[in-house]
Amino acid sequence: MPRRPLSLQALTVLAIVALMLTLATVLLWHGARGADRILVSAMQDTSHQLAATTEERSRRLLDPARVMLRLLARDNLGEERRLADRLAALPMLAAALDAHEVASAVYIGYDNGDFLLLRPAARADEARLPDIEGNERARYLVQQAVSREPGGRRVGEWRLYDADLAMLGRGVMPDYDFDPRTRPWYRAAMATEGEHLTEPYAFFTTREIGVTLARRSQNRRAVLGIDASLSDLGDEMAGFKLTPGTRLAAVSNQGRMLAHPDVGTLLVETAEGPRLATLAQLGDPVLARLGDLEGDGQSTRFREADEAWFGMRLPFQAMDDVQAHLLMAVPEDELLAGTRRLLWQRLLVAGGLVLVLLPLGIWVGHRLGRPLRSLADQVRALAEFDFAGYRGTASPIREVQQLSQAVEGMVGSITDFQHMTHTLSSEPQLETMLAGILDDLLRITASQHGAIYLVDEAEASHFARAAEAGSGGGSATLPERLELEAQGLTALRDEFEGRGYLVQPLCNRGGQRQGLLLLALRGDAETDGDRPWRRFVEEISRVAAVAIEMRRLLEGEKRLLDAIVELIAGATDAKSPHTGGHCSRVPQLAEMLLQGVERDRTGPFAAETVDEDRRAAFHLAAWLHDCGKLTTPDEVMEKATKLETRYNRLHEIRTRFEVLWRDADIAYWQGRAEGGEPSRLDDARERRRDELQAAFRLVAEINVGGEQLDEARARRLEEIAAWRWWRHFDDRLGVSQEEAGRLAREPGLELPVAEPLLADRPRHRIDWVVKPPPVAPEDPDNRWRFDMRPPEVAGHQGELYNLRVARGTLNDVERFRIQEHIVQTIIMLESLPWPAHLRRVPAIAGNHHERMDGQGYPRRLVLAEASLEERIMAVADVFEALTAADRPYKSGMALSQALSILANMAREGHLDPEVFQLLLDSGVWHDYAQRFLKPAQIDRVDIAALKVQAGLASPIS
């Protein structure tokens, strides 16, 4: 039978014995308190004196510096441009430095970026002092930065001088590229009349804490400055310590440290360099606590780090208008040590009484303390986030048992909260997240059953059940959907309250309803004891609502981004029939290959891990890989014949042949009119007609570009081009302003004029509107590392120039304009502010025309060193282009022929052999063919032979 726990109240009866000591204790305390008041008053007086001294000391830092700076500003230092003239002013700068004991440096910054600084050698960083003979005699160190190199780069130099300003040595500082024009003191002084005083900060070179006093020179071409160190303030503060443990600090109103006895604590390292530490960064919880207290000028008693302190927070004005506070904290034990000793001596008198009651106190303390100490140790473990170590405490005291049970319940709730927080922050899937937090909610709220409903985005009054957990409750089954009637939420609440459920709206920060939470009630909903539970559910539902909103927003934004990207790809395909469905088929083929990588367990990609972020970046890159084609001129993209621009100019040339045909007729009739022999004239006319027909047929065949132009036909083309025809009309009438500008390059001719049948004229060269795209390696605007050579002109419509194209219809200029689409793709995509997990989208999308051997374009990257995604894109782009059957200029290749070409390209260093092997082994080639190729294209494929052809396997002997 368990023992009946004792009441803590019954045990307190034992404390009555202590009342015997109360009277003596009160008398002793009253005497000690009077002495404490005297010491606290002394501390207040000392604090006020220190604040006044600190304010006066900071003023003394600046007044001499102002006088020196005004004298220097009136001199012609700002006008000196030669180094020798600037160095001639060193005596004056040294005098200014010596006249101010806390001056760290005096310097001049010029408007061309030059910089000259003089500082005491003793204040220089030892690492910066040159190792030369006699540097122990160094008194001054000169540092300077002068713009000497092309591009405005400054060259640093040091000079070391003794006390008589005799130079001891000099040298170059290659990394000293200091530009004073970028410093705040320079810009502020240039914009200010008179002196400008900076906020305290860490000096660039010495890392001392101080202020800069700067003034613009009279010619407004330079700024003179003096750095004043504040380190002496900390040294003076150390002398005002009342006790060894006294803590002092001067802090600006912005929370930045100005002075401290330990100067080394005033700086913190950041990515931009050393900065003044804040009071929080000082690492002193006592001063940080004192800085947060309200009230100035009055002593404050507080506890920090298990120690009692007396502190004061005094305002003072430092360095002109810089408002600051002096913080002083004195340990109570040290401040009141004398009174404590006196009190202790008097307490010895009463010690005898304590000895009498000691055995009883030991027994009572052990009885009460053992379970409480055990409980305290376990609670301390909870404070250190060791929730698994709590085991409870057994005690005969009722209150201790109740406390142990309460802590145990708290540990369970904290564990559930931890799990819920982890689910809210880490689970990407909305449905899984809702199921997880609903389970946690049931445990935390001790509810038996519940469900979460999400609002229908299309109809705000309809809700669909997204998660359900638990069993029992007030209702056997909750409906799949809920609908708010005209009376709204009140009617729904009344309905489910009767069925034993709490209906809690899930509202986001803007008050918009994201869903509904239904929880089975724990008891009578009308009792007052249920109200805290309802309030708790209401509070925790807000967290769930925000998480739901965030997941829905992220999913919605992702759907929107995917739709926009696919819209761009569709627009690119729709822009030209020459691209067909390329921009929509390549992404699907590429993602099929990436899925093959995920399925690969034994091949070259078995170790590859494709997470959600990597998959999302690849998806976007694949759909955007040819977005630059939107900028490709239509006349280039759609060019079907060599002479085609916005129309086929063969018709214009055919008209010239018609003119020559009529010239032959005219020659025939003129000969007849002049009495010539009809038969001879007729034979000449027929020969000329046959020659014209053959010549035009040759020009027309060459214009198609179906065969390679051989030398014989090229020579005949040159002969035909030299034929002449007579032009009688002005060709500069009725043309556009742009064309008129191109015609103006040619001299005007008196009509009629005989012109060649085919020609390349200045009018045929179309200039770049602004300048060529920045693709040349030496182009300063080429920040994308392109490695291409842009043509001199944006277009070349020369008739012979285009007809001389050896194969195909595109000339060199037009071929560059076609290749430029990938340049524009990279420029467009890299201009977008991609988040961290999508930063590689431009590279994946823009490198699919690179090659494994580095001979691709536009950057000549070695694709073998690129990511797997980039290599997949290259294979997918080529395979789709070879098999596409919706291009007006070609028919789709058979599957075996396309794979054979891919095998050759893999062997020759164009494509990645491993990705080609993945295409074969994963069966993606077959799946893609079934979805996108015509039945006539799907023929027999010999996988083994293709691997041998690609160099992936040895031939079977």
Image: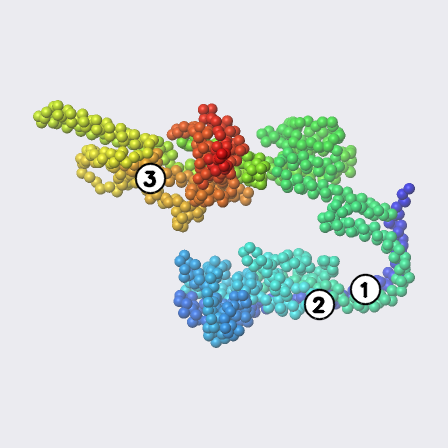
Measured along the vertical axis of the image, is residue 953 above or below residue 358? above
Dot 3 falls on a residue whose secondary structure is: strand
The residue type indicated by label 2 comes to Thr
Query: Mark 3, mark 2: which one is toward the viewer?
Result: 3
Residue 22 at x, y percent in the picture:
86, 60
Q: Residues within 10 Å of mark 1 (few under 14, many from 20)?
A: few
Residue pointed to by mark 2: 243
Residue 542 at x, y percent in the picture:
66, 39
Q: Residue at x 89, y 55 (%)?
A: 363
Query: Mark 1, mark 3: which one is toward the viewer?
Result: 3
Which is nearer the eye, 849 or 358? Answer: 849
Q: In the rendered structure, find residue 30 and report the number of the disc placed on it.
A: 1
How many numbered circles are shown? 3
CA distance for labels 1 and 3: 103 Å
Residue pointed to by mark 3: 795
The residue type indicated by label 1 comes to His
The residue type indicated by label 3 comes to Gly
Query: Mark 1, mark 2: which one is toward the viewer?
Result: 2
Q: Residues within 10 Å of mark 3 (few under 14, many from 20)?
A: many
CA distance for labels 3 and 2: 87 Å
Which is nearer the eye, 195 or 660? Answer: 660
Horizontal relation, residue 15 to residue 169: left or right: right
Residue 320 visible: no
Measured along the vertical axis of the image, is residue 684 above or below residue 507? above
Residue 895 at x, y percent in the picture:
46, 29
Q: In the rendered structure, find residue 614 and report the number of the disc placed on it.
A: none
Horizontal relation, residue 574 to residue 477: left or right: left
Residue 912 visible: yes
Q: Quadrant of residue 447?
A: top right
Q: Residue at x 38, y 30 (%)?
A: 889
According to the image, what is the colour scheme of the structure? rainbow
